[in-house]
Amino acid sequence: MVTAQDLLSELKFSTARSSGPGGQHVNKTNTKVVVHFNVLHSVVLTDSQKLLLLEKWETKITKQGELVVTSQDHRTQLQNKEAVLVKLDHLLKKAFERKKVRKATKPSKTVRLKRLENKKRAGEKKKWRQRPE
């Protein structure tokens, strides 16, 4: 399993002015952290992992093959850097996790009988509501 820590050498961090919390402090400090990870040129990932990432996160990946993740939830650059690594980690885990294969099952005999019994009871109840002929 590949984590954000494994890819640290391939990540490019940049900062920008944040629109998050901080009041007037926001207008003069770069607390927003943006991380760029080039999926196509990654040395750590295998070709199959690259294809999987490109397929799974095609809306988050640029035409140049860069996965861009941002964080501006916190007041400090350090907290946002940690948050962006957690986000990237979450994206990687979600992309590489295998879906469980659903096994087709049939309803048991008791469940089928119970369903028919309930239908019969409902029919009888409706019969009692009708006008007598």
Image (cartoon, rainbow, N blue to C red):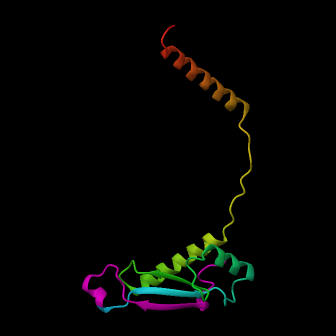
Residue drawn where x is 72% and y is 34% of the image: 108
As displayed, is residue 122 above or below residue 61?
above
Could you say which is closer to the camera, residue 6 or residue 130?
130
Taking the image as shown, residue 110 lies to the left or right of residue 12, namely right
Q: Quadrant of the N terminus?
A: bottom right
104 is within the stretch colored magenta:
no
Taking the image as shown, residue 96 lies to the left or right of residue 131, namely right
**Among the 4 quarters of the image, the one containing residue 6:** bottom right
23 is within the stretch colored magenta:
yes
Could you say which is closer to the camera, residue 49 or residue 129?
129
**Among the 4 quarters of the image, the one containing residue 120:** top right
Report if residue 59 is visible in the image: yes
As displayed, is residue 37 above or below residue 52?
below
As displayed, is residue 16 above or below residue 124?
below
x, y (%) of residue 133? 51, 7
Total count of labels:
0
x, y (%) of residue 11? 57, 89
Taking the image as shown, residue 112 lies to the left or right of residue 72, namely right
Residue drawn where x is 51% and y is 86% of the image: 35
Could you say which is closer to the camera, residue 23 or residue 60?
60
Residue farthest toward the left in the current orientation of the protein: 24
Taking the image as shown, residue 99 lies to the left or right of residue 63, namely right
x, y (%) of residue 122? 56, 23
x, y (%) of residue 15? 43, 91
Residue farthest toward the front in the current orientation of the protein: 133
Report if residue 1 is visible in the image: no
Q: Which residues are magenta?
A: 1-27
